[in-house]
């Protein structure tokens, strides 16, 4: 993968990977950092990536592994940096705050509230159920690709997703979502 | 709730729109290290288990954080580190059998007592975790042929730099990370300041390591995943993992070229380690030799929470 191909890959798959990173880490800033680290590893390995390999699957595998091995470090870095420094980093790195202008304040709050509730319910699932759901919905991966990333049979992915959906449905109904 | 409705809720909640600017890969401007350095130098209590400068070798990690002064400083340390093979060969015969535990492979003073502990290095933690504790040590000395290091608590990991031209370099470029082993990309610079990539091969080796002496090899401690703290406070969690190593005893056995052996034991003690700072305000991460005094721990002295060694016998 050359530089142009990498840029194209970022355009094609970056959103899915970033979304997955944010969901996995549970917060925007750490998710962004995990995304950056994942993409830099990909860039370092760019020329060596097998063209027939599913690069997106590889990137998501790297993100999962980085997070598993390093989450404590990410968390500590976040904690150690004073709040004003965090703001300065965001300014220097060109990160913009979330765009709140698209909806009315009430609509936005309701939508955000619902999103956070569902994300929280998903985050509380055991990892073996949570990962397939996040990969499927946030990273837009197929069952076969999830099977490759998690290194488990497709049948197992399907049964875990089915179990996860059933747990989520029960939990969301208890929270007042339509039955 | 129908399956279709659940599907719709999950899609809407787990796949929010992401702006094109957000997915840009930032090759520059990730200035965390400078931020952290200022943080430390300002005298705030830098609970610094998470930051550091890799001082054991002739490069620093993640070049996007560094400025030209750092590169120049690195270039200087290349000179300090790259030993003349002729001199080495000579020293191999001229010096008595001896070894010491050092932050990295280094020239040793003539009057050092064999087995002595001179200090630890502190590695960049970008890829670190309790699996790869940040502090590292090396075995330095003269006429060493084989090294055996073992621990009675937790595990060890080894770190070996992989340079361009090494047989392992190709593998390092293509290998993906696994939980127990990783080739970590390291930014290195030519004397002209041109950047290129080298690697560190970081690998958990279990409770003991035995092999032919490699003066570039470093060792670190690894806490097995089943022992990781479940404390939700990240700092407390990290401290608790480090404290797993408190009281651990390492055995280092050296076989010299003439077949003779020497063995020493070292105890690990955990706590807040004093991080010295030079005149330019840089933390000296390869000179971690003592814990904070009681007085210092009440003030704003920068520290790293970790372990130090003391020789037992």
Image: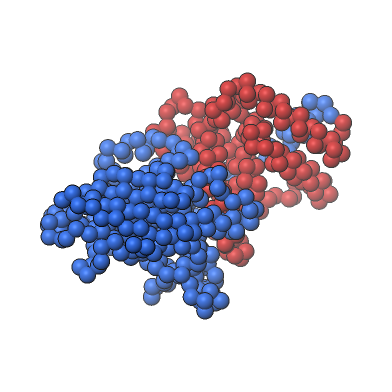
Chain colours: A red, B blue
Q: Quadrant of the N terminus of chain B?
A: top right
* Residue pictured at 85% horizontal, 38% vertical: A174
Q: Is residue A152 left or right of residue B260?
A: right
Q: Quadrant of the C terminus of chain B?
A: bottom left
* Residue pictured at 34% horizontal, 50% vertical: B149
Q: Is residue B230 visible?
A: yes
In the rendered view, tell whether residue A63 sits above or below residue B61: above
- Given residues A91 and B136, the one toward you in this image is B136
Q: Position of residue A134 (x, y in %)?
A: 65, 35
Q: Is residue B44 left or right of residue B132?
A: right
* Residue pictured at 65% horizontal, 53% vertical: B232
- Given residues B232 and B262, the one toward you in this image is B262
In the rendered view, tell whether residue A54 sits above or below residue B116: above
Which quadrant of the figure has residue A141?
top right
Number of numbered discs overlaid on the protein picture: 0
Q: Residue furthest bottom?
A: B295
Q: Residue furthest top?
A: A155
Q: Position of residue B79 (x, y in %)?
A: 24, 60
- Given residues A113 and A120, the one toward you in this image is A120
* Residue pictured at 56% horizontal, 30% vertical: A150
Q: Position of residue B227 (x, y in %)?
A: 55, 47
Q: Position of residue B208 (x, y in %)?
A: 38, 46
Q: Is residue A93 visible?
A: no
């Amino acid at each position: 993968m050359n530089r142009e191909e990498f840029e194209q890959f970022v355009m094609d798959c970056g959103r899915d990977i970033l979304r997955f990173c944010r969901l996995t880490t549970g917060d925007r800033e750490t998710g962004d950092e995990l995304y950056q680290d994942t993409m830099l590893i990909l860039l370092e390995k760019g020329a060596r990536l097998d063209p027939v390999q599913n690069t997106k699957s590889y990137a998501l595998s790297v993100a999962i592994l980085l997070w598993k091995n390093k989450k404590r470090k990410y968390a500590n870095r976040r904690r150690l940096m004073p709040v004003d420094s965090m703001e300065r980093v965001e300014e220097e790195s060109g990160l913009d705050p979330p765009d709140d202008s698209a909806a009315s304040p009430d609509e936005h709050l309701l939508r955000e509230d619902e999103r956070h509730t569902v994300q929280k319910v998903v985050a509380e699932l055991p990892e073996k159920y949570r990962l397939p759901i996040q990969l499927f919905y946030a990273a837009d991966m197929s069952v076969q690709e999830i099977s490759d990333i998690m290194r488990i049979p497709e049948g197992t992915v399907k049964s875990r997703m089915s179990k996860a959906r059933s747990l989520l449905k029960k939990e969301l109904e208890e929270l007042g979502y339509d039955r | 709730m129908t399956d279709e409705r659940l599907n719709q809720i999950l899609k809407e909640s787990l796949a929010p729109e992401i702006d094109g600017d957000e997915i840009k890969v930032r090759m520059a401007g990730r200035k965390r290290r400078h931020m952290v350095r200022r943080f430390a130098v300002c005298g705030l209590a830098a609970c610094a288990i998470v930051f550091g400068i890799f001082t054991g070798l002739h490069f620093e990690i993640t070049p996007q954080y560094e400025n030209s002064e750092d590169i120049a400083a690195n270039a200087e340390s290349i000179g300090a580190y790259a030993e003349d093979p002729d001199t080495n060969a000579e020293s191999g015969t001229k010096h008595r059998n001896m070894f010491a535990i050092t932050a990295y492979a280094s020239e040793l003073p003539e009057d050092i007592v064999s087995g002595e502990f001179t200090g630890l290095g502190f590695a960049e933690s970008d890829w670190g975790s309790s699996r790869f504790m940040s502090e590292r040590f090396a075995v330095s000395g003269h006429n060493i042929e084989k090294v055996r290091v073992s621990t009675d608590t937790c595990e060890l990991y080894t770190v070996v730099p992989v340079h361009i031209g090494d047989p392992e370099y190709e593998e390092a470029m293509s290998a993906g990370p696994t939980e127990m082993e990783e080739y970590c990309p390291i930014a290195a610079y030519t004397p002209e300041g041109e950047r290129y990539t080298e690697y560190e091969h970081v690998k958990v080796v279990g409770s003991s390591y035995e092999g032919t002496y490699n003066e570039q090899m470093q060792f670190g401690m690894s806490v097995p995943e089943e022992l990781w703290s479940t404390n939700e406070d990240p700092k407390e969690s990290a401290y608790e993992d480090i404290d797993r190593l408190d009281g651990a005893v390492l055995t280092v056995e050296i076989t010299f070229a003439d077949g003779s052996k020497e063995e020493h034991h070292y105890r690990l003690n955990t706590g807040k380690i004093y991080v010295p700072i030079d005149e330019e305000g840089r933390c000296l991460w390869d000179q971690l030799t003592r814990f904070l005094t009681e007085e210092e721990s009440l003030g704003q002295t920068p520290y790293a929470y970790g372990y130090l060694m003391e020789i037992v016998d």
